[in-house]
Image (cartoon, grey):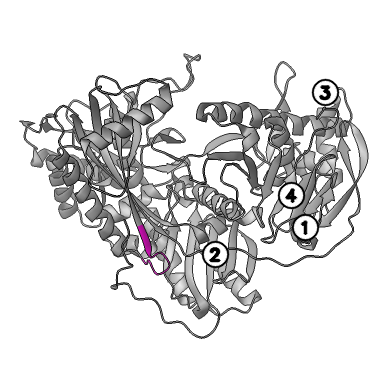
């Protein structure tokens, strides 16, 4: 299904000067920016320190800096998109608005009970998950609608308003309303939200049904509380960012990346009234925007290079996030977790699989070497940064082993101190009974083993043979560790993006508009008819197109709609996502046929002829962004400079080169250190590398020394 870009959104006037696009990723330590000519003829990157107190200030500093450096006028920028960890960090630190929860009388412990699952199934003394809305901030409201829609108890409006006044007087700053069965019968909840917004103008009031009308009371309540907790701060951040960028002369549309791997208009959220559904949805939908943008960027680059099956590896300072991509399609999940909280809104399926570059190495009580999860953080950071850190970290291990070039690390902006790294490893080496190099290499091996141990089950559950995949490492530390991990997994070939340290910013720049909607059904195929399917999907389609018309879709004019459903066998409790073809009218017969094929593929069982239970219908709108293929410099046939690295307990001669000097088609063999301002690539003995026409590095991992071919 395709629709033209609406004429109500005129394209901005353009001068004869070349047009540019900007992508930004706001991380906890650095804010990354990518400036790209619209025709792909020029690509520039930069990093500036993030500002936790004023994240928008760091974004503006990065944008204005890169524009000035490359003599690009603000009027030449036709598109701006950015990802951020602001909302995510707000939730993880629980630093948003104190949120009160209004629930159906009799269900005050909704968040505490959750799904009655232990955090650790073999530890009966594990601390329970702590809800985002404190139990003292929960109020029971006399009302109840049965699952069939009949009213068991009318909404007590007087009690509702009294409960809200009581919470606000006690210091609560936002409210979430979650009534039983509101996903299917939202009348009481809608009335309650309207009364509260009328009585308290400007107050953030999140209704669960208007945000995400899906069954599962606990998960739906979590969505509402998350939205209320974050929305006010997010609105302030987006308003500040928009004002600052406009002051600098950027008149182009502004976008923010979403957890589902798409982007949305910043103006769309800001134009809405405070506390409206549009703002509240934006608060929830942008919680995982940073990692999602990275996967989107990796898929876009890999597809342009002819790679459809890949494993992404985003390794930063504290963790490694990975996604398994098949057929060039970004993987999605409706069962993600965000710290202690379930997230049922669609998001890119990313798994945290190990330690990051700042993770501290230590010995447990049994003398077993561990890496992480504790991190040295940005301050004091690894010992080699010279900022006062004294504990041995994975980055220090890279320095001791020679995998990083102290002279060119981070483009020379960070001077590494190898002596400090060695001093940090000395106590650990003594306890292990080895030298400093041996201890450092052991730490690298442990980190590889941790990533391998967590990635293998993920690949197995998806039925993916790693030998048929390409590993795509990015982030500041990913390319250093990547070949070791690839060898452990049995992956022979790697693709290192042209700028792995800023790939999330590039992903924000090239990703599509995307919007997801859901509607409850809750009927078996014995009662569900074609007309009900068509009516529900038609309503979802109309709402999706209304959302699209509110977006600044200048560069996203090819729209597609995908129909899918959550279906299970009647009597079962777990659904499978079933997608229907976009052409033709949806029917129960077509849905049953699609489910049968999906069930057979998942479980190896023929479910044809069985009665099905259709729990919900969904629709996804995507609007493809105009292509942007990077074309970098041609490089030179440079001769590597002499260097030394540690391999298998021995110091061996190696080389070191600048990534910008690698000419397409010229191969170099390891051991080799390839440096760049954003990230370093380490090639051990037996591996080789060459650059492609887009500036990506194509690596053949070869075989580890001592292993037969």
**Which quadrant of the figure has residue 152?**
top left
What residue does disc 1 label?
A: 665
Q: Earlier in the sequence, mark 4 or mark 2?
A: 4
Q: Earlier in the sequence, mark 3 or mark 4?
A: 4
- Mark 4 and mark 2: Cα distance apart in space: 39 Å
**Numbered label tally:** 4
Determine the secondary structure under disc 4: loop
Please give the name of the residue rendered at 16% of the width and 27% of the height, measured from the top-left corner: 526
Q: Is residue 277 above or below residue 315?
A: below
Query: In the picture provided, is 318 more to the left or to the right than 409?
Result: left
Badge 2: residue crowd in 10 Å (few <14, some 14–19, many ≥20): some
Determine the secondary structure under disc 2: loop
Q: Nearer the viewer, residue 17 or 588?
A: 588
Residue 340 highlighted magenta (yes or no): no
Determine the secondary structure under disc 3: helix
Query: In the picture provided, is 202 more to the left or to the right than 337?
Result: left
Please give the name of the residue rendered at 70% of the width and 21% of the height, measured from the top-left corner: 364
Q: Nearer the viewer, residue 682 or 230?
A: 682
What residue does disc 2 label?
A: 628
Q: Earlier in the sequence, mark 3 or mark 1?
A: 3
């Amino acid at each position: 299904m395709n629709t033209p870009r609406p004429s109500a959104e005129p394209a901005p006037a353009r001068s004869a000067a070349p047009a540019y696009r900007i992508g930004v990723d706001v991380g906890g330590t650095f804010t990354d920016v990518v400036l790209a000519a619209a025709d792909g003829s020029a690509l520039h990157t930069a990093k500036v320190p993030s500002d936790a107190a004023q994240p928008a200030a760091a974004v503006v500093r990065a944008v204005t800096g890169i524009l000035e450096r490359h003599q690009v006028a603000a009027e030449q920028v036709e598109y701006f998109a950015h990802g951020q960890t602001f909302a995510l960090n707000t939730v993880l630190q629980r630093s948003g608005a104190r949120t009160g929860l209004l629930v159906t009388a009799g269900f005050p412990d909704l968040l505490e009970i959750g799904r009655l699952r232990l955090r650790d199934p073999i530890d009966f003394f594990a601390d329970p998950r702590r809800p985002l809305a404190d139990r003292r901030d929960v109020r029971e409201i006399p009302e109840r609608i049965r699952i069939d829609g009949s009213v068991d108890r009318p909404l007590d409006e007087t009690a509702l308003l009294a409960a809200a006044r009581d919470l606000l007087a006690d210091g609560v700053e936002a409210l979430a309303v979650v009534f039983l069965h509101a996903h299917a019968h939202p009348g009481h909840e809608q009335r309650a939200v309207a009364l509260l917004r009328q009585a308290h103008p400007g107050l953030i009031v999140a209704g669960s049904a208007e945000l995400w009308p899906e069954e599962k009371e606990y998960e739906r309540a979590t969505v509402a509380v998350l939205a209320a907790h974050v929305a006010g701060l997010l609105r302030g951040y987006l308003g500040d960012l928009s004002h600052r960028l406009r002051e600098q002369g950027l008149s182009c549309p502004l976008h923010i990346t979403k957890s589902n791997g798409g982007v949305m208009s910043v103006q769309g959220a800001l134009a809405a009234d405070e506390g409206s559904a549009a703002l509240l949805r934006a608060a929830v939908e942008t919680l995982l925007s940073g990692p999602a943008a990275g996967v989107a960027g990796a898929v876009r680059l890999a597809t342009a290079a002819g790679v459809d099956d890949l494993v992404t590896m985003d390794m930063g300072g504290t963790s490694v996030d990975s996604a398994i991509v098949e057929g060039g399609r970004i993987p999605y999940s409706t069962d993600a977790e965000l710290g202690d909280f379930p997230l049922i809104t669609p998001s890119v399926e990313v798994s945290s699989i190990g330690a990051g570059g700042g993770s501290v190495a230590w010995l447990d009580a049994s003398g077993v070497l561990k890496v992480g999860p504790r991190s040295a953080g940005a301050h004091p950071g690894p010992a080699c940064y010279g900022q006062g850190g004294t504990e041995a970290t994975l980055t220090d291990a890279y320095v001791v082993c020679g995998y990083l070039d102290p002279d060119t690390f981070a483009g020379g902006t960070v001077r590494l101190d190898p002596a400090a790294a060695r001093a940090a490893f000395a106590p650990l080496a003594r306890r292990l009974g080895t030298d400093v190099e041996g201890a450092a290499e052991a730490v690298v091996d442990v980190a590889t083993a941790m990533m391998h141990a967590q990635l293998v089950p993920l690949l197995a559950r998806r039925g993916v043979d790693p030998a048929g995949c390409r590993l795509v490492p990015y982030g500041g530390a990913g390319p250093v560790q990547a070949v070791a991990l690839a060898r452990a997994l049995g992956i022979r070939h790697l693709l290192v993006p042209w700028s792995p340290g800023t790939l999330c910013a590039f992903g924000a720049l090239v990703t599509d508009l995307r919007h997801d909607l859901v509607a409850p059904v809750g009927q078996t195929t014995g009662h569900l008819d074609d007309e009900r399917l068509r009516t529900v999907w038609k309503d979802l389609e109309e709402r999706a197109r209304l959302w699209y018309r509110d977006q600044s879709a200048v560069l996203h004019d090819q729209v597609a709609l995908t129909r899918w459903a959550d279906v299970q066998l009647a009597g079962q409790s777990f659904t499978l996502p079933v997608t229907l073809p976009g052409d033709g009218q949806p029917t129960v017969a077509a849905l049953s046929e699609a489910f049968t094929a999906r069930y057979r593929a998942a479980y190896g069982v023929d479910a044809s002829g069985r009665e099905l239970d259709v729990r919900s219908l969904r629709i996804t709108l995507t609007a493809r962004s105009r292509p942007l293929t990077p074309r970098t410099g041609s490089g030179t046939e440079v001769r590597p400079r002499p260097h030394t690295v540690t391999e298998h307990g021995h110091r061996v001669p190696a080389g070191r080169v600048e990534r910008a000097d690698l000419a397409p088609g010229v191969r170099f063999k390891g051991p080799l250190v390839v440096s760049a301002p954003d990230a370093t690539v380490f090639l051990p003995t037996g591996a080789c590398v060459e650059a492609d026409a887009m500036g990506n590095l194509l690596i053949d991992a070869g075989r580890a020394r001592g292993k037969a071919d």
